[in-house]
Image: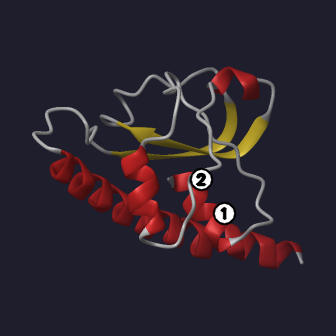
């Protein structure tokens, strides 16, 4: 979600998305809740972080269960890090509708965080360069 949201702000950004234990597919519910905001997740495919192990990133944005202290950060080189902690919406959910609602809440929070990150940090850096 974070990658797709950032891309919706600026198609020229160089963004990579990967996970520690990636699923074999993007959740249909995640695709649906992102489509509600006009963002298409369907062409996305989960990837393992190891394919990016030799790249040094300006920013590492981690998204997942727990706090930044609890999260196991893989051996990725980065200059700055931001963590967005959420409880897994699929864990302990009683219904598909509950999962959808939790995914919508997570989407909205990620959107707010990425909007701030892009407009206050990335865009300002780009303006200084140009």
Relative side of 20 to 130, left or right: left
Question: Which label sits on residue 3?
Answer: 2
Q: Position of residue 107 (x, y in %)?
A: 38, 60
Residue 110 visible in the displayed image = no
Secondary structure, mark 1, is helix
Q: Residue at x 80, y 25 (%)?
A: 54
Residues under labels 1 and 2: Cα distance? Answer: 6 Å
Residue depicted at 61% across the width and 63% down the height: 6
User: At 64% across and 72% down in the image, what residue appears?
Assistant: 9
Position of residue 120 measured from the top left corner of the image (x, y, whole percent): 58, 74
Rendered location of residue 65, percent (x, y): 32, 35
Residue drawn at 26 percent across, 42 percent down: 89
* Disc 1: which residue: 7
Looking at the image, is 29 positioned above or below residue 115? above
Query: Foreground: 96 or 47?
Result: 96
Work out which quarter of the rendered image holds the C terminus and state it.
bottom right
- 91 shown above or below 105: above
Locate residue 125: give its quadrant. bottom right
Residue 108 rendering spot, x and y as whole percentages: 36, 66
Please tell me in which quadrant of the rendered image residue 39 appears: bottom right
Check disc 2 and report its element: helix, strand or loop.
helix
- Classify 10 Å Cα crowding around label 1: few (below 14), some (14-19), many (20 and above): some
State whether residue 6 appears in this view.
Answer: yes
**Label 2 crowd (10 A; few <14 / some 14-19 / many >=20):** some
Q: Is residue 71 left or right of residue 53?
A: left
């Amino acid at each position: 979600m974070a990658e797709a949201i950032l891309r919706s702000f600026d198609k020229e950004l160089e963004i990579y998305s990967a996970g520690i234990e990636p699923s074999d597919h993007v959740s249909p519910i995640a695709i649906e809740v992102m489509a509600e905001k006009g963002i298409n997740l369907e062409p996305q495919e989960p990837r393992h972080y190891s394919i990016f192990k030799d790249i040094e990133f300006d920013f590492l944005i981690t998204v997942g269960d727990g706090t930044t202290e609890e999260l196991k950060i893989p051996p990725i080189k980065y200059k700055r890090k931001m963590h967005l902690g959420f409880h897994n919406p699929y864990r302990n959910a009683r219904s598909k509708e509950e999962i959808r609602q939790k995914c919508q809440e997570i989407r909205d929070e990620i959107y707010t965080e990425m909007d701030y990150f892009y407009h206050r940090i990335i865009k300002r850096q780009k303006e200084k360069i140009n």
